[in-house]
Amino acid sequence: MSVEAQAAGPPPDEIDARQAELPPVARLAAVTLTLVVAGGIYMAAQIGHPATLVPAVILAIAAGLVLLANLIVLSRIKAFAWNKFFQVFGWALVVYLVIAGILEYVFIFDHTPARQLVLFSVMLAMFAIDVPLLLGFSVARYQPVPT
Amino acid sequence: MTDTAVHVGAAPPGDGMGPPPRVPEFSIVPLIGIPIAAALLVGLIVAIATNSLWALTFFHVGGGGLWTSIDLFLGLIIGPILGRLSIPARVEFTAKFMPKMVVIMPTLVAMTLGSGFQLARHLGNLSVSYPHHGWLVASYVIVGVMAIIALGLLEPANLAVLFELKKPHPNGERIGRLMKVFIYTAGITGVMQVATIIIMTFLASR
């Protein structure tokens, strides 16, 4: 290979070429994560204060809708390394369920009021699904599609 | 020998004369790290359950200090060095270093945030009536942005690199691209961590 060809990088392979055809699963997962984190920050900032939960509920509903849309979009991909996706998703789900479980334990241990606890739990559940989904997709998108 | 040859496409001029670099055998998740991470998480749960001020401070300061140091060291020291290494050295370093980060970083993040929340609760700092509540909310926002960057960009890049290296014919150009994302995002979160340290030390000194 000539020096010029090396400096310019290799021509895109089949996997690089396929990237443009994939739906924006990673971006949607990042949007869900951002909405969940924003809701969590709002609620954490109001602890011990009788503030309205409406902004947090709106953020949680928006996050749920984006997550649902993402799952639908993801399920419609035909050519995809589903074996790698489920391998990474499964293990990451175990890890993030443990992390979400620790946080849930903290909220229960601290006698968080029921309405806030439900909202925190819903957000933690979405967090525990969204991050493994993002990790699974990020790995599987660069894997060869089994024939 | 189970090493794999990497077909590196984006090698700098002069690097492409030798044979393709070899990927050393590695495990994506180093099994030896799992019991250590599990022991730390059990310790964290015990610290929360007992509300021990020392244990909560230990996990929060220890975890946060390591998290910040690793991010800054990676982004500002290792990153630039890695960029100047030969392709085989980069591949060997990546294959040996990145699996460790898969276990270390989520453990440190869980330790720091879990103990930090409980510590603030224990000390009464979470309450809106706390005089410096605004500073605490600012730290939530910084940590939230860091979490989005780390979980949305850094960790996916880390895993994608490892799975790419496990292929029979890894794509060196893709590994380089993903490693850049990893190193840059680690540097950004490291710098943001400094802002958190400024807020935390300010609050601790009040």
Image (cartoon, coloured by chain):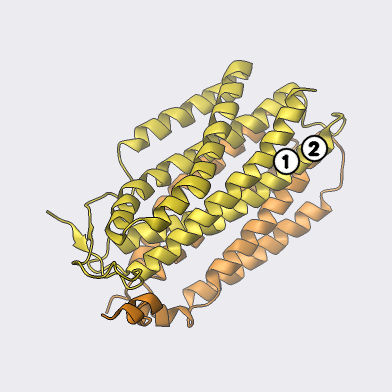
Chain colours: A orange, B yellow
Residue at left offset 48%, top offset 38%:
B107
> Could you tell me residue A10's position as x and y percent?
35, 79
Circle 2 sits on which residue?
Answer: B135
Percent position (x, y) of residue B45?
A: 53, 27
In the image, residue B63 above or below residue A132 = above
Across and down, in percent, residue B87 comes to 31, 61
Q: Which residue is mark 1?
A: B139
Q: Are marks 1 and 2 in contact (CB under 8 Å)?
A: yes
Tally of marks? 2
Picture coordinates of residue B74, whole percent (x, y): 48, 46
Residue A55 appears in which quarter of the rendering? bottom right
Q: CA distance from mark 1 to mark 2?
A: 6 Å
Q: Quadrant of residue A90?
A: bottom left
Position of B188 with respect to A92 (left or right) is right
Please name whichever residue, A74 or B119, is drawn nearer the observer in this view of the structure: B119
Does dot 2 land on a helix, a strand or a loop? helix
Above/below status of B52 relative to B11: above
At 57% across and 69% down in the image, what residue appears?
Answer: A70
Amino acid on which the number 2 mark rests in the picture: Trp
Callout 1 secondary element: helix
Chain letter belonging to callout 1: B
- In the image, B17: left or right of B115? left
Answer above or below: position of B129 versus A33. above
Query: Can you say whether A43 is above or below A30 in the image?
Result: above
B175 displayed left or right of A124: left
Q: Chain of mark 2?
A: B
- Amino acid type at mark 1: Ser
